[in-house]
Image (spheres, helix red, strand yellow):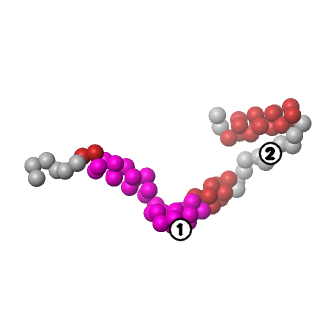
Amino acid sequence: MTVNHQYALDVYRAAQRGEPAGPAPGPHDRAALRELRDHRRFEAVLAGRPARGRIRAALTRRFLARRGPAAGC
């Protein structure tokens, strides 16, 4: 379902319930998502976690933990 389909469904439901419709998707959506991403990175830094590459680092740790000691050592 696209953003426009979801908006049309939300407008229909709001009309059925007699509620005001929500804002239409627009050009400020990207800016809002970018701001959310920046806020999450900021919170990660304050919590002492790396701000970037957290998923890759977690997967690397998991992979290395599974391998165990190197063979032949």
**Residue at coordinates 51% horizontally, 65% vertically from top-left?**
47
* Rendering coords of residue 38 (x, y %): 58, 62
**Residue at coordinates 87% horizontally, 43% vertically from top-left?**
20
**Residue at coordinates 47% horizontally, 66% vertically from top-left?**
48
User: Relative to 6, is 59 on the left or the right?
Assistant: left
Is residue 4 placed above or below 55 in the rendered structure? above
* Rendering coords of residue 39 (x, y %): 60, 62
Amino acid beneath label 1:
Leu
Amino acid beneath label 2:
Gly
User: What range of the chain is rendered magenta?
Assistant: 39-65
Residue at the spot of label 1: 46
User: Relative to 37, is 61 on the left or the right?
Assistant: left
Is residue 48 placed above or below 14 in the rendered structure? below
State the predominant SS element of the stretch in magenta: helix
Say which quarter of the image contains residue 9.
Answer: top right
Residue at the spot of label 2: 22
Question: Which mark is nearer the camera, 2 or 1?
Answer: 1
* Rendering coords of residue 56 (x, y %): 39, 53
